[in-house]
Structure formats: C-alpha cells, structure tokens
Image (cartoon, rainbow, N blue to C red):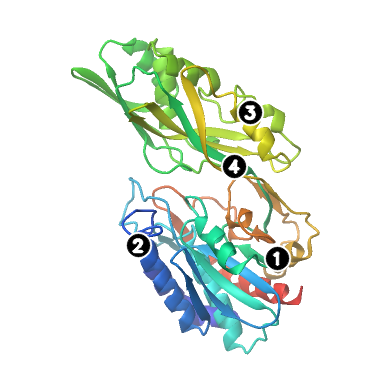
C-alpha cells in the first residue's frame, strides 16, 4: 500500500490540481449550480472512469462511480463545490501551489483532496484484485456548501445508501452533528443607508462596509469601542459617513474562532449612540455573543454540545436591512425546540425568515458501520486513544441515511478552510488515503 501511494504521489497532486482549477462556487450561469460546477463534475467523472468505475451523471446535481456487486450499497460522498475564494490570498486560489510540505488552493482541503484520496483508495484496491462484496459508490456532489440539494437529488433518483461516510469532517469520525437553522433577519425600519458584508452564509465576514448620515453618532465613542476590542477600521467622512471594519473570517459552526467584522460594526454604532430601532434590536438579541444567550439558546444545551448563533452576511433591500443568521443547535435537541427559540426574533418592525433547516444527526458509537470506520483509523495510525466526536458543522450525512463524516481533518490546525490561503499538509493527504483504503475494506465486511 505504501509503495502504491509513493508511486502515485505526483498523480494524486496532478488530479488535485485539476479539480482545484475550477472555481466551483454556486452561480446562475448554468443549471443547476453553475457552469464551473458542471465542469468540475465532468472532470471528476472522467477520473472515476479512468480507474475503472462505472459512472453516472445525475443531471449535474452530482455524479458517481461504482464498483462491486451485491444488494448493499456503500456510499463515499465527497463534494466538489467550494465557497468563494475571497480576499487575502498570497497566490492564485485556483492554481495549486506547493510550498514547505503544503499545497495551497481553494478546495485543497475542503473537499477536493478528500475526493482524490478516496479515488486512489479505490484505485489501489482495484489494482490489487480486491473483491468488492458490496456495491461501492464514490459520489461527487456540487451543492454541499449551499444546501446539499445535490444529495437530496441523489436520494430522489437512487435512494438511500446502506452505509457509508463523507470525508468532510475529521478523524476518527463524527457520530453527531448539530442541527442547523439558516435564514434572514429583516429589519424593516433602519436609518442605515447601505451595508455590505458579503461572502457566504456559513462564513464569518472578514470585512463590513456601512454608510450612515454624517454626525449621526458619537465618532469618538465609536473609535474608542473598536480600539478597545482591537478592531481595525476606516472612516470616510464625506456627505455621508462610510464605515469599514475588518475582522477574521472562519466557519460559522465555531464563530468564536474568528472576528466578526459585521457584529463589531453594528455594536460600535449602538455604543456610539446611533439612533436606530434595528440597531437596538440587534444589541438586545445579538451584540457580540457567540452562543445566543440573549435569544434564549441556553435551553437547548446538552452534555455534548451547545448552540452557536451568528450573523454572516448583510445588505440593504427595498424592505429594509437583511442579515443572514446561522444557528447550530445541540445534537440531542430538535428542530421544534430550535424554532421556538428563533420565534423570539420578531416584533413590530423586525422578523426572522427561515431559509434552511436540518435536524441534528446522532449515532450510537456502537453502530457497526461507525465502529468499522473508527477501527480503520486506529489500525492505520495506531492511535487507540482517539475518540469519536460531535461537531457543529453540517455535512452530507444529514441528507442521506446511514452516513457519518469520517476524515479528512486531523486536528492539527492551520488548514484555513473557508478562509484565505486554504492549505493541505501533504503528509496528511497520503495518510488519509491509507485510512480510506482500510475503511473501504472494513465496510466491505460489515
């Protein structure tokens, strides 16, 4: 196995570079998820055909390559879409760059490298003459980052899998994922002229630009507040005041790891005396909190997880100010309870409109396929102290039965997923391939 990986290192890098070259963000230039998503799926299907898999394109929502026989289907479900590259990169995010044992590029970790690792795991087994007693499907989806409609389409066309994993979490495996509510907080009355905090609904914004009337707040208090919190900012004083704050982007599942440029700007306006009913509403329920304490999210805390609640995107529309809200609630709670909490975000002038929601995911750690995956990690790494985990992120596992997130993260940090200079440690790229080989063999025997 190690010789196979050594012999194929450059091939793996070439295939990863090919996938990274596609800016496969959600767009409306082609159905269903954009032209670049169609192109990256075509490339992935070509790769799967190249190792001997029988391929199928499901209307460009997703596609798969299959090998094996039998009544049971094992799914290995990776995603080929990415979040927007954003700013702050040291090199072209769509040209894979290698430096000091890492490769850099959007999707280098999340999640295109995982697809390549799983592809080569199957390639190794095929070339070794391995007998697949079940039907194994390597599935590449094109809408994980913005709703997972791709896998919902797969289920509609092909049904659920009997067991499997999505390599879009961490090792040694994720047996629980928080529930998710995503939507828009709309303030129908505001004195804010314009505001922009752009990116993606599941990313803490790195910057925020806001325009208000001149002399509408105490500028000294505004600056003092931001300085005390070490927030970089700019103020452009013309006919109106243009305010810009800078933070640090991170995944919305753990907002405390970043610095939210949007919330700091809004809270600074409140502290500086900006007269605005929406800003008052924001301060009452959000301010600088990470866990929705003022909304009442504490009622959902369990022995494994708590709730995160954050704001990610902002804009001004005809009906008022729109802020995207991302809520992740505990694995032992339920959607009904979460919705009852979010119902507090209503008054005469403000409302919350739900856009997407998902129940939590929770498996007993003794579930046979879960144990088989965990054992694959232990067998390859020798790390018997590792424990299955729960997380705030939402993966394909919520959209299809009998699936957990397994890999591809190793908890060493520094991958910059969803941020600038996303990178992959090459040592992990090859190690995860070994783990996926063992995982496939274990699932074949469950």
Q: Which residue is mark 3?
A: 341
Question: In the rendered view, would you say 161 is above or below 293?
Answer: below
Q: Which residue is mark 4?
A: 180
Q: Which residue is mark 2?
A: 36
Q: Which of marks 4 and 2 precedes in the sequence?
A: 2
| Left or right: 147 in relation to 43 | right
The residue tagged with tag 1: helix, strand or loop?
helix
Q: Position of residue 209 (x, y in %)?
A: 32, 29
Q: Which of marks 3 and 4 precedes in the sequence?
A: 4
- Residue placed at 71% from the left, 62% from the top? 383
CA gap between label 2 and label 3 equals: 38 Å
- Residue placed at 62% from the left, 69% from the top? 75
Q: Which residue is mark 1?
A: 373
Q: Residues within 10 Å of mark 1 (few under 14, many from 20)?
A: many
Question: In the rendered view, would you say 441 is above or below 410?
Answer: below
The residue tagged with tag 2: helix, strand or loop?
helix
Q: Position of residue 416 (x, y in %)?
A: 46, 50
Does residue 306 appear anywhere in the picture? no
């Amino acid at each position: 196995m190690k010789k196979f990986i050594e012999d194929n290192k450059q091939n793996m890098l070439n295939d990863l570079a090919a996938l990274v070259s596609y800016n496969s963000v959600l767009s409306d230039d082609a159905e269903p998820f954009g032209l670049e998503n169609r192109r990256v799926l075509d490339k992935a299907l070509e790769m799967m055909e190249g190792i001997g898999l029988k391929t199928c394109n499901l209307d460009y929502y997703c596609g798969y390559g299959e090998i094996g026989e039998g009544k049971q289907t094992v799914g290995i479900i990776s995603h080929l879409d990415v979040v927007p590259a954003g700013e702050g990169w040291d090199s072209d995010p769509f040209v894979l760059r290698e430096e000091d044992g890492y490769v850099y590029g959007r999707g280098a970790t999340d999640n295109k490298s995982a697809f390549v690792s799983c592809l080569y795991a199957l390639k190794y087994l095929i070339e070794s003459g391995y007998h697949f007693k079940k039907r194994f499907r390597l599935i590449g989806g094109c809408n994980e980052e913005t709703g997972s409609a791709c896998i919902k389409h797969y289920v509609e066309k092909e049904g659920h899998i009997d067991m499997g994993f999505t390599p879009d979490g961490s090792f040694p495996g994720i047996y629980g994922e928080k529930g998710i509510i995503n939507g828009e907080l709309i303030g129908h009355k505001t004195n804010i002229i314009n505001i922009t905090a752009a990116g993606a609904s599941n990313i803490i914004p790195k910057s925020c630009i806001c325009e208000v009337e001149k002399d509408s707040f105490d500028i000294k208090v505004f600056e003092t507040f931001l300085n005390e919190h070490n927030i970089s900012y700019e103020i452009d004083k013309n006919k109106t005041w243009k305010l810009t704050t800078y933070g640090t982007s991170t995944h919305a599942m753990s907002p405390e790891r970043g610095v939210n440029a949007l919330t700091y700007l809004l809270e600074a306006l409140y502290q500086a005396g900006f007269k605005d009913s929406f800003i008052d509403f924001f301060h009452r329920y959000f301010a600088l909190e990470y866990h929705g304490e003022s909304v009442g999210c504490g009622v959902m805390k369990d022995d494994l997880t708590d709730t995160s609640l954050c704001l990610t995107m902002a804009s001004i529309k005809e009906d008022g100010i729109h802020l995207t809200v991302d809520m992740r609630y505990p694995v032992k709670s339920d959607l009904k309870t979460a919705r009852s909490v979010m119902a507090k975000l209503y008054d005469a002038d403000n409302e919350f409109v739900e856009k997407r929601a998902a129940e939590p995911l929770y498996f007993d750690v003794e579930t046979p396929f879960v144990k088989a995956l965990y054992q694959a990690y232990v067998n390859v790494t020798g790390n018997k102290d590792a424990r299955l985990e729960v997380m705030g992120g939402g993966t394909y596992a919520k959209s299809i039965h009998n699936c957990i997130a397994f890999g591809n993260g190793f908890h060493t940090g520094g991958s910059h997923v969803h941020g600038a200079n996303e990178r992959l440690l090459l040592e992990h790229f090859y190690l995860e391939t070994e783990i996926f080989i063992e995982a496939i063999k274990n699932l074949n025997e469950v």
